[in-house]
Image (cartoon, grey):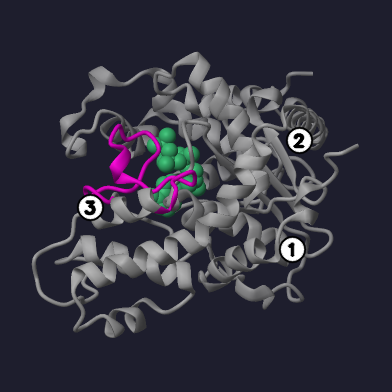
């Protein structure tokens, strides 16, 4: 087979640039007891294997926020995992449907996203990599969880508003209202809880925008355990794993996060952007007219966002980066940010371009991944059905 394990042939520079950025990010697991799991310091102390689950929507080409807030953590967790840790990464097609999608574009994005996951360094021999929509257990568990989710709890989720606002290029969430809301978008946090709980995941590395969904997931897990008792509680309460760069902001509107669904392509750096695109987008990033560079997320969100990006790319502390640019002009600063971003993405970009044409290889990876995922979630769903009486 000519397509055996592309990652083993990946260049050391690609791996080292990813590892530098991933290593630099302070990774923290948030739960009832917050646990730092950076640089493997807790691996020996762990009582039981971790089950890591995360997902990304096939809603377009991943951007710098997806990389720094999520995908590079996935790679880091894979690199630092203990041998008995389970790593499960999913392309969540059903979530993409919560906003209107062009079927042709969705189908292409779905395939491309798999190539992206491999290109950033996920290894299908170590991690389960699959399409959510090829494992029906997610939908089955989502329905069951829907039936124990109070409407009031879902109403308190604000993400549907941000997602709608981003997709309509609205200036803020107050510009969207419930008349634009479909039921799928309203209830997608429950589907997300099902994604996680189907594998009884213990750790969920996602960006800061997803924090409220992890809290809902924990509530649902706790509610299920309390209502449907067995010898042991069925679901562990998953912890949110974040990095210090868990919220990268839009380059055009630093009051909102960088998002795949925003119609403004200049608001985000795509993994596929070439050197000159990266430069022009960073040059056009909204900052301010104050002389010199300081790190002040409240008063100078645009400059702070670029400082965060630069620090995340180079693995430095953001305050240290800021002090280096205190007397420098915006032009010089932005040029350095662009160089650092280019350095970070050029390896994965080239690997993605190479892999995306290998359709037979990608199809075989998807098929194997889905089979493994179904096998893993089958026992959870069997137990769920027994506990709720659907047997
Ligand atoms: P969409 O606009 O379609 O929702 P998205 O850019 O929000 O797309 P998702 O597929 O929803 O991307 O999220 C994939 C992962 O990337 C999640 O873990 C999410 O928390 C993280 N993420 C998304 N945007 C950012 C961002 N701007 N900064 C940091 N992390 C992000
Ligand atoms: Mg999103």
Specify whether 171 is left or right of 352.
Answer: left
Q: Residues within 10 Å of mark 3 (few under 14, many from 20)?
A: some
Q: Earlier in the sequence, mark 1 or mark 2?
A: 1
Specify whether 366 is left or right of 189.
Answer: right
Q: Quadrant of residue 388?
A: top right
Q: Residues within 10 Å of mark 1 (few under 14, many from 20)?
A: some
Residue ID for mark 3 = 284
Q: Is mark 1 within 8 Å of ligand 1?
A: no
Residue ID for mark 2 = 380
Q: Name the residue nearer the viewer: 122 or 188.
A: 122
Residue ID for mark 1 = 81
Residue at mark 1 to residue at mark 2: CA–CA distance: 23 Å
Q: Residue at x 60, y 72 (%)?
A: 38
Q: Determine if the magenta segment contains residue 44.
A: no
Residue at mark 2 to residue at mark 3: CA–CA distance: 49 Å
Q: Residue at x 47, y 49 (%)?
A: 66
Tell me whether circle 2 and circle 3 mark residues in contact (CB < 8 Å). no
Camera-side mark, 3 or 1:
3
Tell me where residue 202 appears, x and y as whole percent. 66, 53
Q: Is residue 336 above or below residue 217?
A: below
The stretch of residues the image draws in magenta is 251-275
- Name the outermost residue toward the top: 103
Q: Earlier in the sequence, mark 3 or mark 1?
A: 1
- Name the outermost residue toward the front: 276
């Amino acid at each position: 087979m000519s397509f055996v394990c592309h990652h083993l042939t990946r260049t050391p520079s690609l791996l080292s640039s990813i590892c530098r950025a991933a290593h630099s990010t302070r990774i923290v697991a948030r739960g009832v007891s917050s646990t730092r799991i950076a640089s493997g310091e807790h691996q020996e102390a762990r009582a039981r294997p971790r089950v890591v689950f995360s997902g990304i929507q096939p809603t377009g080409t991943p951007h710098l926020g997806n990389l720094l807030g999520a995908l590079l953590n996935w790679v880091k967790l894979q690199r630092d995992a203990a041998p008995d840790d389970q790593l499960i990464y999913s392309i969540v097609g059903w979530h993409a449907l919560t906003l209107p999608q062009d079927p042709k574009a969705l189908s292409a994005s779905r395939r491309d996203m798999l190539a992206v996951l491999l290109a950033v360094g996920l290894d299908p021999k170590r991690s389960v990599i699959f399409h959510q929509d090829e494992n029906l257990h997610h939908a089955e568990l989502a329905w069951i969880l829907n039936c124990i989710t109070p409407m009031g709890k879902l109403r308190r989720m604000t993400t549907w508003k941000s997602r709608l606002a981003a997709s309509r290029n609205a200036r803020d969430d107050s510009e969207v209202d419930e008349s634009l809301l479909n039921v799928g978008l309203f209830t997608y946090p429950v589907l997300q809880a099902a994604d996680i709980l189907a594998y009884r995941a213990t750790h969920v590395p996602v960006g800061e925008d997803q924090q409220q969904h992890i809290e809902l997931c924990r509530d649902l897990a706790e509610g299920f355990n309390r209502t449907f008792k067995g010898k042991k509680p069925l679901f562990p309460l998953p912890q949110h794993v974040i990095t210090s760069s868990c919220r990268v902001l839009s380059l055009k509107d630093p009051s909102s996060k960088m998002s795949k669904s925003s119609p403004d392509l200049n608001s985000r750096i795509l993994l596929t952007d070439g050197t000159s695109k990266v430069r022009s987008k960073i040059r056009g990033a909204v900052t301010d007219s104050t002389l010199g560079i300081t790190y002040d997320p409240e008063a100078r969100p645009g400059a702070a966002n670029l400082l965060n990006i630069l620090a995340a790319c180079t693995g430095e502390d953001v305050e240290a980066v800021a002090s280096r640019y205190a007397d420098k002009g915006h032009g010089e600063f932005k040029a350095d940010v662009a160089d650092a971003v280019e350095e970070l993405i050029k390896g994965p970009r080239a690997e993605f371009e190479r892999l995306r044409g290998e359709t037979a290889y990608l199809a075989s990876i998807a098929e194997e991944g889905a089979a493994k995922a179904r096998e893993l979630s089958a026992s959870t769903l069997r137990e769920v059905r027994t506990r709720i009486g659907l047997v």
